[in-house]
């Protein structure tokens, strides 16, 4: 190993050691009147529509007036929140005195809270950042040991979790942290590593509220052509085989359908907007310049024929409005929820895309009305299951 790599690895290990030692010793502040529930929000409310949907659903499930929102970003989740405080990114990655300083926010919140819900989704298996994943499991564990009931909700678990995350989830589970998985496939994967979980559904289904988007979008949707919602990311348009197949398939139907490109993420790590523009330049359509609210996307989905998406939560928000979709899945995380709705054949892995997409596309094209009915009839029960997470 290169000396610089060795040095970085030593620093990471020291960060973990110092922060873990502090968490082992830290105690909550004296209890105050409050009896609130702490909600550790999904991380990117400003730049990620899926994170907004998870946090909005969780707030609705807990009840805004009982929710103490711990959030990294400022975003208007609800005007009725009992309390809200910004949490620092240092809680995920810092160590020593910096971590101790920032953790005071959690200690103070714990003095008026009796329980904690932490939104898991894609963060907790270490795929994006194993150290951040481990730290969050440790904080959930700290809450369970020192404050009251602690749960991680909407958990998905990929096909290749990081060893740090595997160790952390086992430790948290043993300490009493409840884990709510959003699909049976994730639950099975956790059982394979010896971790039990409670099967519910994605907490974005807690509320299926619709809200009209701006008039420009409403008027565009009034076209004689039916609308297809498309969400692509940089990894999709940079795959020439996937890109060419999407391009030819959409061009083959543009006489009867119009394409609405909906970016779901707008931060430096993910370039949905640029990817959507690249495909739209080849097939026509309109790329929305701003991120939607979850309830606006549901409204648009209700008015559209079907969708094609490389973002899981675009599919989930569409499902809530009955929209059938093809999901270009990554990390094996689409299949579980698609299967829950009887739509597993429409969750296609990149390696099988050129083989399976044409048949799935043809079925959506000819049968999207019946598929919508099949999905819509299941949503009330799925929403009720999601709400059970917070009872």
Image: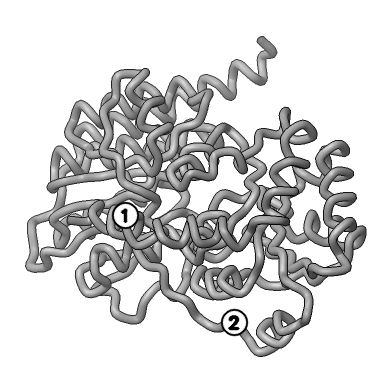
Q: How many neighbours does mark 2 have within 10 angstroms: few (below 14), some (14-19), or many (20 or more)?
A: some
Query: Looking at the image, which is closer to me, 209 or 62?
Result: 209
Of the two numbered discs 2 and 1 on the same chain, state the one appearing first in sequence.
Answer: 2
Among the 4 quarters of the image, the one containing residue 33? bottom left
Q: Is residue 52 above or below residue 343?
A: below
Note whether residue 24 is visible.
yes
Write down the residue under mark 2: 213
Circle 1 packing at 10 Å, graded few (<14), some (14-19), many (20+), is: many
Q: Is residue 367 left or right of residue 16?
A: right
Q: Secondary structure at mark 2?
A: loop
Q: Which residue is mark 1?
A: 386
**Disc marking residue 192:** none
Residue 40 is situated, as x and y percent measured from the top left of the image, at 34, 54
Residue 98 showing in the rendered view:
no
Picture coordinates of residue 340 (x, y %)? 43, 43
Q: Is residue 18 above or below residue 306?
A: above
- State the quadrant of the C terminus: bottom left
Please identify the residue farthest to the top as the structure is shown: 1
Q: Residue at x 66, y 14 (%)?
A: 3
Residue nearest the observer in this picture, 322 or 39: 322
Give the residue displayed 71% in from the left and 59% down from the top.
230
Quarter occupied by residue 41:
bottom left
Between 5 and 350, the one lying in front of the other is: 350
In which quadrant will I find the N terminus?
A: top right
């Amino acid at each position: 190993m290169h000396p610089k790599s060795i040095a970085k690895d030593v620093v990471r290990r020291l960060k973990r050691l110092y922060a873990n030692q502090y968490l082992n010793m830290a105690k909550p502040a004296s209890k105050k009147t409050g009896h609130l529930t702490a909600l550790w929000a999904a991380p990117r409310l400003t730049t990620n529509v899926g994170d907004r949907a998870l946090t909005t659903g969780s707030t609705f499930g807990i009840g805004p007036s009982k929710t103490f929102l711990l959030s990294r970003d400022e975003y208007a989740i609800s005007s009725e929140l009992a309390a809200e405080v910004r949490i620092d990114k240092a809680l995920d990655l810092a160590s020593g005195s910096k971590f101790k300083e920032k953790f005071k926010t959690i200690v103070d919140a714990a003095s008026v809270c009796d329980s904690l819900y932490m939104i898991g989704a894609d963060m907790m298996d270490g795929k994006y950042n194993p150290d951040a994943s481990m730290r969050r499991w440790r904080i959930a564990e700290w809450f369970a040991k020192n404050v009251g009931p602690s749960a991680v909700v909407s958990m998905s678990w990929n096909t290749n979790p990081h060893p740090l995350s595997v160790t952390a989830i086992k430790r948290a589970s043993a300490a009493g942290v409840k884990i709510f998985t959003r699909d049976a496939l994730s639950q099975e994967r956790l059982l394979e590593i010896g971790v039990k979980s409670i099967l519910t559904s994605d907490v974005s289904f807690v509320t299926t509220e619709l809200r009209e988007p701006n008039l420009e979008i409403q008027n565009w949707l009034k076209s004689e052509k039916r609308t297809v919602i498309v969400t692509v990311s940089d990894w999709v348009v940079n795959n020439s085989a996937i890109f060419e197949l999407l391009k030819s398939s959409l061009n083959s139907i543009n006489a009867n359908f119009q394409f609405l490109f909906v970016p779901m993420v707008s931060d430096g790590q993910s370039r949905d907007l640029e990817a959507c523009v690249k495909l739209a330049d080849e097939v026509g359509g309109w790329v929305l310049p701003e991120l939607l609210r979850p309830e606006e996307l549901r409204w648009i989905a209700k008015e559209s024929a079907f969708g094609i998406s490389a973002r899981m939560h675009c599919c989930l928000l569409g499902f809530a409005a009955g929209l059938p979709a093809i999901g270009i899945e990554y990390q094996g995380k689409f299949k579980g929820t698609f299967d829950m709705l009887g739509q597993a054949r429409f969750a296609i892995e990149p390696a099988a895309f050129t083989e399976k997409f044409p048949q799935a596309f043809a079925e959506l094209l000819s049968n999207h009305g019946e598929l919508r009915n099949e999905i819509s009839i299941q949503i009330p029960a799925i929403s009720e299951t999601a709400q059970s997470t917070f009872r």
